Image (cartoon, coloured by chain):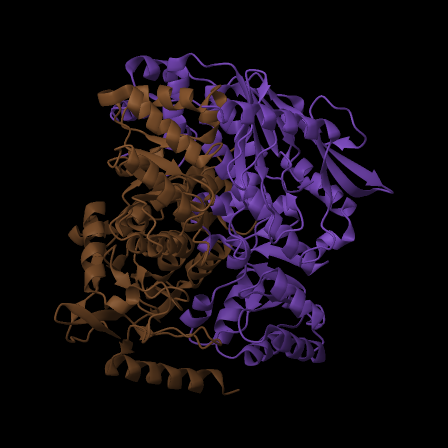
Chain colours: A brown, B purple
Amino acid sequence: MPTTWVNDDNAALFTDLYELTMLQAYFREGMDEEAVFDLFVRRMKRRNFLLACGLDTVLHYLETLRFTPEALDYLGTLGLFGDDFLEYLAGFRFTGDVYAVREGTPVFANEPLLEVVAPIGQAQLIETFVLNQITFQTGAASKAVRVVRAAGDRAVVDFGMRRMHGGDAALKAVRAYHVAGVKATSNVLGGHVFGMPVTGTMAHSYVEAHDHETDAFRAFAELYPETTLLVDTYDTLEGVRKVVRMAREMGEAFRVRAIRLDSGDLAALAREARKILDDAGLERVRIFASSSLDEYAVAELLAKGAPIDGFGVGTRMGTMADQPYLDTAYKLAGYAGRPRMKLAAGKVNLPGRKQVFRCFEDGRAVRDVIARADEDLDGTPLLECVMRGGVRTEAGRRTLADARAQAEAGLVALPERLHALDAAEPPYPVDLSEGLRRRIEEVRQALAAETHPA
Amino acid sequence: MPTTWVNDDNAALFTDLYELTMLQAYFREGMDEEAVFDLFVRRMKRRNFLLACGLDTVLHYLETLRFTPEALDYLGTLGLFGDDFLEYLAGFRFTGDVYAVREGTPVFANEPLLEVVAPIGQAQLIETFVLNQITFQTGAASKAVRVVRAAGDRAVVDFGMRRMHGGDAALKAVRAYHVAGVKATSNVLGGHVFGMPVTGTMAHSYVEAHDHETDAFRAFAELYPETTLLVDTYDTLEGVRKVVRMAREMGEAFRVRAIRLDSGDLAALAREARKILDDAGLERVRIFASSSLDEYAVAELLAKGAPIDGFGVGTRMGTMADQPYLDTAYKLAGYAGRPRMKLAAGKVNLPGRKQVFRCFEDGRAVRDVIARADEDLDGTPLLECVMRGGVRTEAGRRTLADARAQAEAGLVALPERLHALDAAEPPYPVDLSEGLRRRIEEVRQALAAETHPA
């Protein structure tokens, strides 16, 4: 039985079947001219902006994309593909160019995050994988940045892995969260793979396994002197008092850094816990909170003045619970030198190769303009060439640290109103250039002429 | 750089850091007596029942769980773990017992889907992985079964992989969807790994890449005679008429099986398309619909009498958009022969080893009773031993086909009202046995005596 995990070796099969049947059709029809596909988000819904993320995963995939003998054997069993085509697949490599927005860049609806320029079969085949990774990682970063902003100068820590959608989501999110400014993760594999700080406290079960709550606190603090103690297993404030008694008994040796609240009325409990700690001279013991948190809950706690120093944010951030997917699309914008467009209701796309220009005033982004790639407008162009002929360019080798720095700078430059949790009024303006508008009109007219006559 | 995918080799690091720090604490404290943990869903929210799924992935993980030299090297860099503990980890194996509900069984809130009985450190360490997989796979199956039910005798096909949360979700969902009765998937890797039927149509881009829509239809149908043609790229009904003209021209050679609608008012378009096809004598050409479908949309289309023969269901099912996570918990229920419980607000659990008895009347499930494992009550016990001493039992080697059959039989036996998309009134009754109630009271009293005195 094949492995039940996606990996670099089987990623070529991580595709909708139609990508392969279309690829064979292009192969048979001899259609191998250059196509332009772009990936964008149609509507942002509950987000005032998105943070572009996932490019590095995509570039790695494009560099390593191969059909293994096992994959070819399987495809052969489907009764759909000819031997000549399977032979072609055996030598398949991605040889195209990719233009992309830098990871960490704030982006908006309809702006291409990625443009792929490659022989049409190649550009088509990669659709499913590219959408899967960019949609999730951009969605995760765009959710997390809201939580981070709501928490202000308090740390946000990722506790989400246990209820996220499978292993890959939990792992890749660690990367996306770092871009968005999350401070650390509980995900050990994520720490290993992406070099992130890992952190954690203790579980209720640890407390319960001991005969007395205090025994658990003592044992854990002896082994991990600067730990965080979970105080709500039985009675939260009683738990805090036990910490205080332990501090008294231990004296100088007491170096516990924080307590953690994980249930109940967090604002009220944090205030009472703070008072108990302060009254005992334990001002330096911090209060860490978790339990069904998201940006709204964090903002509410801080608005109530809850003396909470850090937040463990799990499931709701991890599943992007208020908007579990982005409305991404990967659409043909050109083939054989001609711009292309579809007219299906509500699903129109922007034809031809494009560039996005971000215009600044006094260091603040004030407007984006989506233009033709051959236009040279005011503002900073956001799309750069990250892969040429299937090989990463210098710009395609940016580090995760660069993505985080890009996000930090990009977030500072956004109009303040976009950082609201609710819909910004007015939304950030994204215009189409005159040149692009003209092109759209031309394509529309050409299509009308083509499709409507008998 | 390590691989950015989760796999069998690095799965031991797929854990929250605290599982490892607790494991080291148990190791140091010499606490290695048997613990009982159980996994259950606290509240079902928008589901009238859940379909248990994910057990096979969990048992495979437990059988293969190892810390590789690479994993141990990484853990060594964290400054948290002693050499003796790392050496212990190098030899770590899961040697416990697992009791579980058969995959495909309908289950309800508070019922254990899984009980793990093992030395406490082992049972603790596996928490994150086990929750991650069971939460997602059970969530996915529980969502899909609603869509399948709404579609009645029409086929539901999984089109979700492009916007699901990463690679693992898209892959494991194929398994969960099969259990829930989904007929096929577009996910080629899922087809390979789980032996599922794969299917697909064509993309708008394929149509757009051709100079004329009809050229695309012809070329595709020549290569795949029994294909489905996507008709809405420019003008849906015009697209249908082109199919009709093509049928006339091709005569006997025309074997296209279906057309696909992917935008606009699907009910109205399906009716008009049906009429155009029927008027042309193409009654046998079926209508397949996709575009933002979920159980509600499918039910509405069928309620309107839309002549749709099959549904491609993607993002909303794939991300469980109306309820993107299950409120699962994995809680210590016993240690060293004594039942354990936590009392944190809203997070109480059921102490000790348990069994769930499902009571039937005239072949219909009428009530479940959660009992102590040592009680012998009326009804069918749902938990069976699937792993003993770290090795799968016969019951732990059930096939995916068995899970699907289990779901089919289980669904038929559910009271009809539970199949409504909205909240069933009354909800399915789940009681606690007398024996379990007494145990809860005893544990509560013991805890009160322990935690409240000075």
Q: In this view, does B273 lie above or below B300?
A: below
Residue B235 can be seen in this image: yes
Rendered position, A295 above or below B207: above
- Up/down of B423 relative to B440, above or below: below
**Observer-nearest residue: B450 or B86?**
B450
**Residue B256 visible in the snapshot:** no
Residue B158, horizontal then vertical, whole percent: 56, 54
Q: Which residue is drawn at 23% across and 68% down?
A: A415
In front here: A395 or B246?
A: A395
Residue at 33% across, 84% down = A442
Give the side of residue B364 with respect to residue A105, left or right: right
* Residue B5 placement: quadrant: top left
Relative depth, front residue between B33 and A402: B33
Indicate left or right for B110 with A357 as reference. right
In the rendered image, residue B80, in percent from the top left (x then y), is placed at 28, 23
Instruction: Give percent across and percent down for residue B220.
Output: 52, 64
Going by the image, does B154 lie left or right of A452? right
- Mark count: 0
The image quarter containing residue A169 is top left
Residue shown at 39%/83% (left/top)?
A444
Q: Residue A284 placed where, x, y %?
A: 24, 35
- Residue A374 located left or right of residue B343: left
Which quadrant of the figure has residue B46?
bottom right
- Outermost residue toward the left? A362
Foreground residue among A340 and B28: B28
